[in-house]
Image: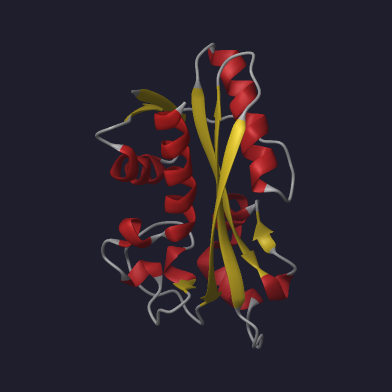
């Protein structure tokens, strides 16, 4: 079985391949596409998957994820990539100065859609805290500031964090189960 994963993020492709292959081969379609604005990553992923499946005339998979920080009213949420490019990890750290409640949730929504059909989506979540400084060189995105629940280290400090990232792994494993049982 082969899936067409549409993303411009090569790190996500690597994670998907580590979780899905060899049973499900990941064909990477590298392209940027417009995303709707919503606070709900599942809504964004479903909308994008349906739009791309109809445009490309093939079944596709997309993923939308974000870091939702409780003390900042779930900011940056589904706009995480946008704000990461603008203010970076240091900008998030600065926003969190003097904030004691550092609880956050990493969310990942994976959506699958065939042309002219309704999309299905799968949500994975992982609770944690925002570190007081960026730590580590592993992972990507917000990994150097995300401390998963039960750990003292950020994902950026954990060499094989792909295998541990519960938020994306949960969503991708739900997709895997759906595809293998359909």
User: Vertical placement of 44 versus 153: above or below?
Assistant: above
Nearer the observer, 147 or 85: 147
Horizontal arrangement in the rendering, residue 129 relative to residue 40 (left or right)? left
User: Vertical placement of 59 versus 31: above or below?
Assistant: above
Going 48% across and 75% down the picture, which residue do you hit?
149
Where residue 26 sits, quadrant-wise, is top left
Going 65% across and 51% down the picture, which residue do you hit?
78
Q: Where residue 75 sits: x, y (%)?
A: 69, 63
Going 53% across and 14% down the picture, which residue do you hit?
56
Horizontal arrangement in the rendering, residue 36 relative to residue 162 (left or right)? right
User: Vertical placement of 71 versus 84: above or below?
Assistant: below
Horizontal arrangement in the rendering, residue 30 relative to residue 93 (left or right)? left
Q: Where residue 153 sits: x, y (%)?
A: 37, 78
Q: Where residue 74 sits: x, y (%)?
A: 70, 64
Nearer the observer, 34 or 48: 48
Going 46% across and 52% down the picture, which residue do you hit?
170
Residue 34 visible in the shown view: no
Quadrant in which the N terminus is drawn: top left
Residue 166 visible in the shown view: yes
Where residue 121 sits, quadrant-wise, is top right
Q: How many marks?
A: 0
Which coloring applies here? Answer: secondary structure
Q: In the image as oriented, which residue stretches furthest toward the top?
A: 57
Q: Where residue 20 sits: x, y (%)?
A: 33, 39
């Amino acid at each position: 079985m082969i899936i067409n994963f549409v993303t411009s993020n090569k790190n996500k492709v690597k994670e998907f391949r580590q979780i899905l292959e060899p049973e499900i081969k990941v064909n990477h379609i590298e392209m940027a596409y417009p995303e709707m604005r919503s606070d709900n990553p599942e809504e964004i992923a479903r909308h994008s998957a349906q739009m791309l499946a109809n445009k490309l005339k093939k079944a596709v998979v997309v993923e939308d994820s974000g870091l939702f920080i409780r003390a900042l009213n779930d900011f940056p949420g589904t706009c995480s990539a946008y704000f990461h490019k603008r203010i970076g990890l240091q900008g998030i750290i600065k926003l969190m100065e003097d904030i004691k409640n550092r609880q956050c949730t990493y969310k990942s929504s994976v959506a699958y859609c065939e042309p002219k059909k309704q999309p299905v989506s799968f949500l994975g979540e992982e609770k944690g805290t925002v570190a007081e400084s960026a730590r580590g060189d592993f992972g990507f995105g917000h990994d150097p500031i995300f401390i998963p629940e039960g750990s003292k280290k950020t994902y950026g400090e954990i060499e094989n964090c792909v295998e541990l990232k519960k938020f994306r792994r949960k969503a991708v494993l739900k997709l895997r189960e759906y595809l293998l049982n359909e």
